[in-house]
Image: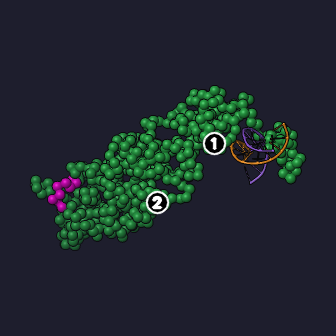
Chain colours: A green, B purple, C orange
DNA sequence: AGTGCCGGGCA
DNA sequence: TGCCCGGCACT
């Protein structure tokens, strides 16, 4: 309501209108509204004067009534979104606004935007503002009705909310309706095109986790009813042209949607697991359910203790959906750090920057999970903090081999060092893993000093590993895999009887020692 | 998947 | 102790 009102008010510029002929012959002429100014002729009656650029290039001023009469109806305004020159063909008054909108135009509305005459040259920026403001649902609750200088302030607010909100929102349905009515015949002048929209949205919003320039509770609580209409067209809405209103449902099912409706677990690919990652600054909480992540955000970050029913939906801004390949990453997540993907897990540790200590400067740069779909979060994300830790483990797993007395490859010296600092077994054989959550992660694929073992077996053995000196002797004694010929290769399986006994017994070959 | 071989079971 | 094999690491 209020939103549309404002849109109406602002959108008159650029409208093509009929105006009385300046020659007085009665033949209406067309012109484009260039500016609106408000005349306060007396205290009570305020009237708008429209500066219209006539076809002949002259500028004329008309009162609202004059234009309205000439146009056979009240001066209607809709979003006159036009290309750069503001020329709007074919939209004229045919842009049928609902009576309510028309009514908003009346002088009686004391809150009409006072348009400075200097704005008669409608700049590109102005046009863009209109585009933006028409595409974005700015909840009226955030805006004061007393805003006098609407254009700039509104635009600023819109931009601000856009840039800070992790969620790109779509224009409210009402706006779309208006648009579809007035623009349906107007292909090129689509309010927003896929490119423009996605670019703007992608550009501003989400660098969220990495870009922490908007640390303080960025995005406003938007009214819940504005959610659904909005979330949709942001991505696919424009692809099919000016069919904005129909898009929502379609886009909602878009698998690549960045939007998260409450019933998230809809269609999931077999091997994909959907998690929800907290986007709060320095928080990387990953939970498996929307309820969980919302609760986390609500309680931890928003400081609200109440239940979800008193939520205004603000939590939605602070988490994102990520898809994990359950074969690899998710498994690592769930098995290595069981605490994280759990709804019931306690709140994460107080937000803190990534511990530089635990991360060797150059030895590892965990590639983001290939299948993890994240909304262009640059660099290391909270997720990648946990998931790649599996890789980390795998790397360090080689450490024990490197710590053989013979030589220590420099590449692994880092982990060896960190091992000595973070965890110091009796003989520093590669107990290096020292990243964030100490005990739990440690149980993962830690170094098995003596011999390789099954995963579960390693887990069960963790205690003993911690409590007793690793069997370094046996670990180190494991022969480096011989590269030379072995009995099996030489004689083949069919001549097994020709193998040395060791080979026959699956022991280290004694015949072809390296 | 193939290979090397460690750890452990069994007689 | 000899023999065998499960299973892991590595290629």
Asked which quadrant contains residue A83, the reply is: bottom left
Q: CA distance from mark 2 to mark 1?
A: 36 Å
Residue in the foreground of this view, choosing between A130 and A472 = A472
Q: Which residue is mark 2?
A: A266
- A80 on left or right of A502: left
Disc 2 residue crowd, few under 14, some 14–19, many 20+, Cα 10 Å: few
Q: Is residue A355 visible?
A: yes
* Mark 2 in CB contact with mark 1 (< 8 angstroms): no
Disc 1 residue crowd, few under 14, some 14–19, many 20+, Cα 10 Å: few
Q: Residue at x 49, y 46 (%)?
A: A341
Asked if marks 2 and 1 fall on the same chain, the answer is yes
- A513 on left or right of A217: right
- Which chain is mark 2 on? A
Q: Where does the image place residue A69, in percent across and percent down from the top left?
A: 19, 69
Q: Which residues are magenta?
A: A105-114
Asked which quadrant contains residue A15, the reply is: bottom left
Location of the C terminus of chain A (image quadrant): top right
Residue in the foreground of this view, choosing between A216 and A125 = A216
- Residue A457, disc: 1
Q: Mark 2 or mark 1, which is nearer to you?
A: 1
- Is residue A76 part of the magenta span, yes or no? no
Location of the N terminus of chain A (image quadrant): bottom left
Q: Where does the image place residue A132, in percent across and percent down from the top left?
A: 35, 55
């Amino acid at each position: 309501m209020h939103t549309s009102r404002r849109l109406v008010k602002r959108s008159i510029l650029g409208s093509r209108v009929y105006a009385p002929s300046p020659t007085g012959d009665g033949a209406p002429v067309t012109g484009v509204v260039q500016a609106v100014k408000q005349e306060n002729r007396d205290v009570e009656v305020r009237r708008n004067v429209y500066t219209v650029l006539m076809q002949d290039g002259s500028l004329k001023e008309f009162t609202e009534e004059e234009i309205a009469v000439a146009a056979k109806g009240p001066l209607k305004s809709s979003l006159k979104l036009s290309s750069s020159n503001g020329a709007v063909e074919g939209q004229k008054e045919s842009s049928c606004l609902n009576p309510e909108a028309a009514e908003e135009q009346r002088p009686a509305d004391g809150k009409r935007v006072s348009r400075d005459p200097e704005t008669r040259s409608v700049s590109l920026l102005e046009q863009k503002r209109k585009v933006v403001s028409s595409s974005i649902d700015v909840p009226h609750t955030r805006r004061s009705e007393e805003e006098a200088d609407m254009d700039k302030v509104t635009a600023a607010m819109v931009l601000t909310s856009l840039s800070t909100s992790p969620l790109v929102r779509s224009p409210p349905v009402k706006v779309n309706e208006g648009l579809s009515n007035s623009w349906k015949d107007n292909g090129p002048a689509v309010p927003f095109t896929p490119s423009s929209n996605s670019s703007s949205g992608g550009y501003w919003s989400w660098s969220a986790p990495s870009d922490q320039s908007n640390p303080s509770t960025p995005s406003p609580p938007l009214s819940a009813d504005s959610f659904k209409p909005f979330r949709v067209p942001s991505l696919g809405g424009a692809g099919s042209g000016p069919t904005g209103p129909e898009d929502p449902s379609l886009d909602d099912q878009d698998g690549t949607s960045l939007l998260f409706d409450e019933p998230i677990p809809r269609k999931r690919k077999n091997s994909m697991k959907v998690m929800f990652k907290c986007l709060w600054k320095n928080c990387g909480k990953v939970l498996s359910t929307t309820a969980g992540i919302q609760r986390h955000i609500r309680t931890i970050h928003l400081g609200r203790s109440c239940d979800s029913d008193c939520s205004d939906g603000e939590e939605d801004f602070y988490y994102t959906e990520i898809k994990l390949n359950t074969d690899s990453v998710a498994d690592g997540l769930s098995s290595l750090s069981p605490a994280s993907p759990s709804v019931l897990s306690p709140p994460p540790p107080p937000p803190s920057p990534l511990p530089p200590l635990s991360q060797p400067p150059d030895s590892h740069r965990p590639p983001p999970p290939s299948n993890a779909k994240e909304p262009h979060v640059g660099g290391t994300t909270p997720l990648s903090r946990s998931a790649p830790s599996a890789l980390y483990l795998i790397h360090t797993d080689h450490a024990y081999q490197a710590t053989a007395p013979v030589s220590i490859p420099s590449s692994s010296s880092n982990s060896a060092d960190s091992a000595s600092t973070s965890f110091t077994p009796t003989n520093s054989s590669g107990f290096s893993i020292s990243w964030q959550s100490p005990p739990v992660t440690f149980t993962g694929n830690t170094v098995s000093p003596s011999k390789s073992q099954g995963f579960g077996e390693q887990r069960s053995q963790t205690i003993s590993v911690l409590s007793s000196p690793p069997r370094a002797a046996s670990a180190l004694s494991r022969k480096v895999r011989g590269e030379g010929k072995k009995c099996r290769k030489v004689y083949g399986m069919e001549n097994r009887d020709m193998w040395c006994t060791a080979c026959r017994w699956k022991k280290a070959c004694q015949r072809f020692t390296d």
